[in-house]
Image (cartoon, rainbow, N blue to C red):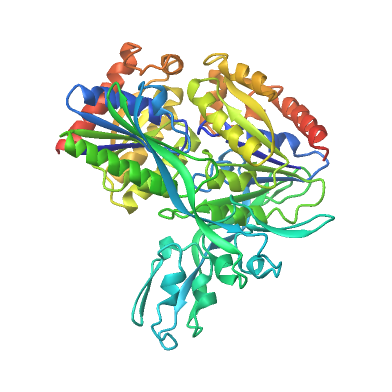
């Protein structure tokens, strides 16, 4: 079983578009599982027509809660919280302490500081995850509730579920649609994969962010290839990316042209291959060939 | 007035809007602060070319155990909610990457064997964009933008502590200053940190199903959960369909501006040219937008 993650650093460079198309090509060769690791803003489901099979809750960490009856307003908790989660509210009638859940990191400092037993720590329901049947294989996706942390943990969880399902079904490929950035969920999405496909665009931001995500891949020894999306938008910058890749000894696995067919396909819930655009289809096929070569090599 | 530029989906034009706002507002009476809080992938500097005057390391306070004072009670490991400490007798292992810096271990160690040290996880830089040109770059003065950028070190997981430090740099902003925060994509804790304390959340989207899906999530966080005022800028207008505008109308969310889907804008962006320079009329459009927002929030 081979795992391929699509990353970019910068958002909006075409990760989901490419991941869906790669999954489509992979599904013609073997059994595929898909993972949408952008659990903050999952979009793969808008393209691969999933039907939900399973739904699970995701609890992560804890959150503090104050028992107003027991609270003596001593303020010890406020003195210990380093995250500004304890709010002292004063109105005409009374003073009270409240915990702002979006600031609480669940560290229990307030719980330990309270001498009146007025604070308890409870599990935090942080999101949910799903197993669905999509048209290219089973899709493992999730919804991190707004303002939650630990998206990395949720990504790890759905990747595990995908691996387990793929192992049981003798799946050949796991295609992971990664999140933007370089932080916690990106690392969770890319540890232990066989190849990371970095989608970039020939813009100053795209190049800047590509270098950082390549640094992360290097840091964790994840093998990477680069795809330049909208390469004809700025040929000079495209050459700059090619030189950058050459200097790092990283393969440019494909060039995808700037084409209105991409947003058109997305608006209709289709992949660029479904849309039938010749130029785009052959560009994506080339990327897939390069990935396969890398997986076999 | 603090304006946070956020989006949900990545690549919709947050940095384009944030830098255009800052440039349009500069050279006006009020001081302008531009905070790049997309610390995983900060890009605003590419469009405003700041001269950086200072840099400081920021990070998380992590424990250092004094083996002489440790009596092997293991209390530190028990009170750590993040499994960042493992204690085997008097051998105490600290897993720095897991530490949130809450201070439980050092505060609660019965023998006072734990002190805390700043472990750098990123940096905050400060400087000027625009204004008076000095020999070695910008030097502030009339029309200058206070530019502050946070960068998370590669290999680090937690963006929020760096974002908090970037925001601290704007605490010295005088009353009446305009503070513009360029937020990261997404809807989880880093985005929330950027929205806290904002007078207005400017949500940038594109009129595609991905853009709309993620805009709804951003509204859920900014307006419904945090109670911010929200308004939408539709970028690449004409690209997809009309569902984004229908949604905004239905929710009573103002569409404050539409930036057309125009290859010229994309090409200018690709070379780091800000929108206010790429096309005529945008300086005025963003100034009018700022006036509208100032009236709305009353600051």
Q: Looking at the image, which residue is at 60% across and 48% down?
A: B193
View extreme (bottom): residue: B68
| Quadrant assignment, res B178 | top right
Q: Looking at the image, which residue is at 36% across and 20% down?
A: A49
Viewer can see residue B255 = yes
Q: Nearer the viewer, residue B118 or A125?
A: A125
Q: Looking at the image, which residue is at 78% across and 46% down?
A: B177
Residue B186: x and y in percent read 51, 38
Q: Is residue B116 left or right of residue A49?
A: right
Q: Is residue A113 above or below residue B153?
A: below
Residue B175: x and y in percent read 82, 49
Locate the N terminus of chain A by quadrant.
Answer: top left
Q: Is residue B262 above or below residue A192?
A: above
Q: Is residue B202 left or right of residue B190?
A: right
Viewer can see residue B38 = no
Residue A13: x and y in percent read 44, 30
Locate the C terminus of chain A by quadrant.
Answer: top left
Q: Is residue A3 left or right of residue B213?
A: left
């Amino acid at each position: 079983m081979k795992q391929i993650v699509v990353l970019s650093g910068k958002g909006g460079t075409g990760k989901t578009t490419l991941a869906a198309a790669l999954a489509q090509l992979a599904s013609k060769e073997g059994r595929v599982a898909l993972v949408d690791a952008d659990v903050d803003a999952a979009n793969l489901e808008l393209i691969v027509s999933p039907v939900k099979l399973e739904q699970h809750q995701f609890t992560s960490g804890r959150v503090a809660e104050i028992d107003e009856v027991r609270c003596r307003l001593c303020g010890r908790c406020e003195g210990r919280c380093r995250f500004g989660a304890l709010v002292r509210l004063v109105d005409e009638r009374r003073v009270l302490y409240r915990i702002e859940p979006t600031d609480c990191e669940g560290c229990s400092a307030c719980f330990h500081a309270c001498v009146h037993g007025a604070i308890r720590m409870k599990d935090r329901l942080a999101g949910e995850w799903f197993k669905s049947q999509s048209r290219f294989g089973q899709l493992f996706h999730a919804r991190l509730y707004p303002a939650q942390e630990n998206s990395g943990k949720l990504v790890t969880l759905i990747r595990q579920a995908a691996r387990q399902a793929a192992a049981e079904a003798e799946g050949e490929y796991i295609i992971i649609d990664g999140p933007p950035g370089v932080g916690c969920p990106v690392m969770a999405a890319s540890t232990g994969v066989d190849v990371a496909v970095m989608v970039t665009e020939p813009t100053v931001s795209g190049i800047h962010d590509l270098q950082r995500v390549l640094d992360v891949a290097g840091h964790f020894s994840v093998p990477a290839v680069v795809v330049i999306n909208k390469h004809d938008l700025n040929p000079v910058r495209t050459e700059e990316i090619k030189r950058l890749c050459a200097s790092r000894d990283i393969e440019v696995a494909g060039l995808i042209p700037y084409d209105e067919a991409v947003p058109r396909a997305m608006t209709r819930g289709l992949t660029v291959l479904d849309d039938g655009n010749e130029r785009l289809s052959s560009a994506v096929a080339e990327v897939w060939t390069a990935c396969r070569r890398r997986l076999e090599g | 007035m603090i304006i946070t530029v956020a989006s949900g989906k990545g690549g919709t034009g947050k940095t384009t809007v944030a830098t255009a706002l800052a440039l349009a507002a500069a050279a006006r009476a009020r001081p302008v602060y531009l905070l790049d809080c997309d610390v995983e992938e900060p890009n605003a500097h590419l469009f405003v070319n700041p001269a950086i005057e200072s840099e400081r390391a920021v990070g998380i306070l992590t424990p250092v155990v004094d083996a002489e004072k440790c009596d092997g009670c293991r209390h530190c490991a028990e009170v750590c909610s993040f499994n960042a400490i493992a204690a085997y007798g008097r051998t105490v292992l600290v897993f720095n990457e897991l530490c949130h810096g809450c201070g439980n271990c050092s505060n609660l160690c019965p023998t006072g064997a734990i002190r805390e040290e700043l472990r750098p996880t990123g940096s905050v830089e400060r400087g000027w964009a625009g204004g008076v040109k000095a020999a070695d770059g910008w030097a502030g003065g009339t029309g200058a933008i206070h530019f502050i950028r946070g960068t998370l070190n590669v290999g680090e997981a937690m963006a929020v502590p760096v974002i908090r430090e970037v925001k601290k740099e704007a605490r010295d902003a005088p009353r009446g200053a305009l503070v513009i925060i360029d937020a990261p994509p997404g809807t989880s804790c880093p985005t929330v940190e950027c929205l806290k304390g904002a007078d207005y959340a400017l949500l940038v989207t594109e009129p595609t199903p991905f853009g709309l899906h993620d805009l709804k999530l951003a509204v859920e966080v900014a307006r419904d959960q945090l109670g911010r005022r929200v308004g939408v800028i539709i970028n690449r207008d004409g690209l997809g369909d009309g569902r984004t505008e229908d949604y905004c109308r239905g929710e009573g969310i103002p569409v404050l501006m539409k930036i057309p889907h125009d290859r010229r804008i994309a090409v200018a962006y690709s070379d780091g040219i800000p929108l206010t320079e790429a096309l005529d009329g945008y300086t005025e459009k963003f100034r009018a937008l700022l006036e509208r927002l100032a009236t709305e929030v009353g600051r």
